[in-house]
């Protein structure tokens, strides 16, 4: 275990909502949702801390959010604006270190073991960064400081918003022991419930399980859990994080089981994917279809080809078999999404046999169940 590293995790506070409140003074101090309209079928993309006091959170249907707070303000997302501000934040990070791993527009890991100011204290660096973000951009952020990525990320959430938490190596095991098990990386709702049944409520309980027992109950994840509960996480901060997938999805204006309507929407999404791949100069080998039904049950079906997909036609060629595999006609659909993964640079494009475009006649045959 390398406990000499100095890792910072910076997480912006309610980033999308905070940018909107900064840019629009009339929104400041108000419960605000960035997302769809209250009468729409959209969901909350982000919300201000004032809105969170009413129990509103990300991914909540906007129609429910407005029921929780009648005077809630709604505004549409401005992704270009958020990307612009994110670039300004990343530029501040670059004043301190070149070893930066962005996780999203509003959070990143920084390795400051060796830094551009030769500052020995990672906590001082984190506070300097937070102060620069506030002074220059008018936004608050929170930070976690420790010797590995797992602890730094968890620590950044402890004193949110606008706070910092430092966990030195000698305090790591104690810090992890008191963590609720749901805070552990990779522990979702299903795994959390399984752990509860095993009597694991927090880190201290997990610490009592040896490697063999954790592997028995959780498979490959057991080894990772065994290490992190003991403060062991040697993952490096990786500056060159490659994009793993490109996707597009849409929430339908009304639930539908009409396969022709579903196909029309999927063709539109495949066109958007082609545009995104063209912009990023890439293609991909794996296509994933995401379907959310009217009851919010969500499924996905994927297929990997031997040759990469670069165009809308390539995508549409395999959509029918994904639709068949999903049994999409069984109940009304609320949301549809497509994503391409196992990406490849367009310049290294392999020789690809031409794939036939799905004609309207072929779609009609599929719709009729032929």
Image (spheres, rainbow, N blue to C red):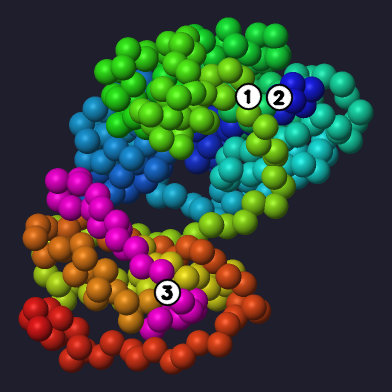
Gap in angstroms between the C-alphas marked 2 and 1 = 6 Å
Residue 354 seen in the figure: yes
Q: Which mark is residue 232?
A: 1
Q: CA distance from mark 3 to mark 1?
A: 38 Å
Percent x, y for residue 331?
A: 9, 57
Question: According to the image, label 3 marks what residue?
Answer: 305
Residue at far right of view:
118
Residue that protrudes farthest toward the front in the picture: 212
Residue where numbered disc 2 is placed: 1
Q: Nearer the viewer, residue 318 or 117?
A: 318
Circle 1: element type:
loop
Q: Is residue 197 left or right of residue 118?
A: left
Residue in the image at 90% along x and 31% along y: 117
Secondary element under disc 3, as helix, strand or loop, is strand
Crowd class of label 1 (few under 14; some 14 to 19; many from 20; radius 10 Å): many
Closer to the chain start, of discs 2 and 1, is 2
**Which residues are drawn in magenta?**
289-314
What is the crowding at mark 3: few (fewer than 14 residues within 10 Å), some, or many (at least 20)? few
């Amino acid at each position: 275990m390398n406990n000499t590293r100095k890792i910072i995790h910076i997480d912006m506070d309610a980033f999308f909502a905070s940018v909107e409140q900064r840019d629009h003074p009339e929104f400041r101090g108000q419960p605000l949702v960035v997302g769809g309209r209250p009468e729409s079928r959209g969901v909350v993309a982000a919300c201000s801390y004032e809105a969170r006091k009413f129990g509103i959170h990300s991914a909540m249907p906007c129609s429910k959010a407005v029921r929780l707070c009648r005077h809630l303000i709604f505004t549409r997302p401005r992704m270009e604006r958020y990307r612009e501000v994110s670039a300004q934040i990343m530029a501040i990070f670059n004043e301190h270190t070149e070893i930066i791993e962005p996780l999203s527009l509003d959070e990143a890991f920084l390795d400051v073991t060796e830094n551009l100011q030769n500052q020995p204290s990672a906590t001082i660096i984190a506070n300097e960064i937070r102060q620069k973000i506030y002074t220059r951009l008018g936004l608050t952020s929170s930070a976690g400081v420790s010797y590995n990525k797992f602890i730094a990320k968890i620590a950044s959430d402890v004193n949110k918003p606008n706070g910092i938490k430092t966990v030195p190596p000698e305090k790591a095991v104690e810090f992890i022991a008191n963590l609720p098990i749901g805070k552990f990386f990779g522990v979702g709702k299903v795994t959390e419930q399984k752990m509860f049944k095993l009597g694991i409520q927090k880190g201290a309980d997990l610490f009592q399980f040896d490697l063999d027992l954790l592997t028995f109950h959780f498979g490959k994840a057991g080894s990772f859990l065994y290490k992190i509960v003991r403060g062991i996480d040697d993952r490096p901060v990786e500056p060159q994080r490659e994009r793993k997938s490109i996707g597009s999805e849409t929430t339908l204006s009304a639930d539908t089981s009409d396969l022709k309507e579903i196909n029309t929407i999927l063709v539109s999404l495949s066109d958007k994917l082609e545009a995104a791949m063209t912009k990023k100069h890439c293609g991909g080998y794996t296509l994933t279809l995401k379907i959310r039904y009217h009851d919010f049950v969500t499924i996905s079906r994927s297929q990997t080809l031997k040759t990469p997909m670069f165009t809308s036609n390539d995508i549409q060629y395999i959509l029918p078999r994904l639709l068949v595999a999903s049994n999409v006609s069984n109940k009304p659909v609320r949301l549809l999404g497509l994503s391409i993964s196992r990406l490849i640079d367009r310049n290294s494009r392999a020789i690809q046999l031409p794939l036939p475009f799905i004609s309207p006649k072929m779609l009609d045959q599929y719709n009729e169940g032929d």
